[in-house]
Image (cartoon, rainbow, N blue to C red):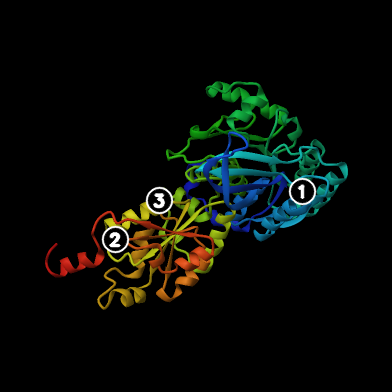
Amino acid sequence: MEAENFHSFDVSLFSSCRVLVVGDMMIDEYLWGEVSRISPEAPVQVVEVKKTTSTLGGAGNVVNNLTALGAKVSVAGVMGGGKAGDLLNGKLTSLGVNTDGLLVDQGRATTRKTRVIGANQQMLRIDRESKQEISEEQVQAIVCFAQTQIPQCDLVIASDYGKGVLTRPLLRELAKICKTAGKALIVDPKGMDYSKYKGATCITPNKREASQASGVEITDQASLERAAAKLLETAGAEKILITLGKEGMALFSPGEEPFRVHAQARQVFDVSGAGDTVISVLGLSLAAGASYKTAAALANAAAGIVVAKVGTATVDQAELKAQLQDQPIAYQAKLKPLQELQGVLENLRRQGKKIVLTNGCFDLLHEGHINLLEQSRKLGDVLVVAVDDDESVRMVKGQGRPIIRERERVKIISAMTGVDFVTVFSTNQLNELIRAVRPDILTKGGNYKPDQVLGHELVEELGGRVALIPDASDVSSTRIIQDIRNGRG
């Protein structure tokens, strides 16, 4: 398949791919709080911590991306013991990952980056880590695990964050095993010396990393080609894919013309973890039979999705398929039954995302509904809209309602760009809905008081709060319907 035809690539093939990820597994921790005073001890702000969240970081974020795309993943690396190690292992196993190759070293710190967030901004980052290279015994243990896993895998990804796992001897052995087994070894590199990656199939630095490692300041196409040629020679790799931010990415192979993939124009919110998405989609595409050009184009499309999200994010098959077809996310991809939605939100919650829930009939969408959805979206990172089923609308609004049937109401709400997920529920399922979603914020329109909002007690019991969205106008569906029936259009 040529790159020009990458739009027709079947991303569902990712679900049959098996991947081994070797590298520096980390924990990204977030302390969320409020700032209201200055410390009497020093001229610094005091953050009153309200909640703590954590997610996989480093090579672990590559795992996040792979599993979000449906791949089956095994990991190899070294972590410390204690609570941080248990947390890391627990998050991996909760994703269904094989962690038999993740060694425990009681004398080593599990890399943990703690970010303190107050007043909607990062106040401080605290790093606890070890950069010491792992021992020869640990290298051999990982090699033994890799020898059993690589023949069963479709691909190996080495994610180097410079924390000591991907030593030169380990990388050399991984390259040998991959060559013998006929499997690709894709490397996300770190540092200045790319000779340690000799034998890799493909390396994926970003522009800054490529410039630093090659000693060539990349300012135009000519300097980009010089940097790529130097790194290909140093690493002895078959390919190098250099990501260029808003300029897309460029694929180079010895003796071949460069292949440029241009980024699609879109609003960029956050580039955190975009490189992990690129190597994940590139690798899965190759494992599923794509050419390098097609794989690069697919990786570029996936990167365009994640940079439009807030925080370190992932992309799933439905989003990528919609992007390839140059369509907005299909409403079926946003519509989730409650049980499935619960699992999706748990994963987002582990990534530190703030979840907002609102609910209603939405029978004849009007200005007040639009305002409710827009204002609700601004309060968090993920907006879930629960739509009353037809029977519930009939019970609440009376005979003759709904005017717009359930399926059409769901489709209309899903078309709103700020809405992330939609679920259908009945009035007697409100508590079940709240327990499944566990919103940080439950929003309601109209002139209510917080204690008048149904479900407010359970939301608060689960650690959330109620936010009231004032009506932007005095328009209501009921009044519109009455005006139509009375001939007052």
User: Few, some or many C-alpha atoms within 10 Å of disc 3 (few <14, some 14-19, many ≥20)?
Assistant: few
Q: How many marks?
A: 3
Residue identifier under label 3: 327
What kind of residue is marked 2?
Leu
Residue 365's label in the rendered image is 2
Please determine whether, in this image, residue 170 is positioned above or below residue 231.
below
Q: Nearer the viewer, residue 457 or 73?
A: 457
Q: Nearer the viewer, residue 324 or 243?
A: 243
Q: Quadrant of residue 42?
A: top right
> What's the residue at 79%, 45% (across, down)?
177
Q: CA distance from mark 1 to mark 3?
A: 42 Å
Q: Is residue 448 visible?
A: yes
Does the residue at mark 1 contact the one at mark 2 (Cβ under 8 Å)? no
Compared across the picture, whether 475 is left or right of 195 comes to: left
- Give the percent coordinates (x, y) of residue 462: 54, 64
Task: Give the mark, 2 or 3, whose residue is nearer the N terminus.
Answer: 3
Quadrant of the drawing holding the C terminus: bottom left
Task: Give the mark, 1 or 2, whose residue is nearer the N terminus.
Answer: 1
Residue identifier under label 1: 79
What kind of residue is marked 3?
Gln
Task: Give the mark, 1 or 3, whose residue is nearer the N terminus.
Answer: 1
User: Few, some or many C-alpha atoms within 10 Å of disc 1 (few <14, some 14-19, many ≥20)?
Assistant: many
- Give the percent coordinates (x, y) of residue 206: 60, 33
Q: Nearer the viewer, residue 197 or 236?
A: 197
Please determine whether, in this image, residue 310 is positioned above or below residue 189.
below
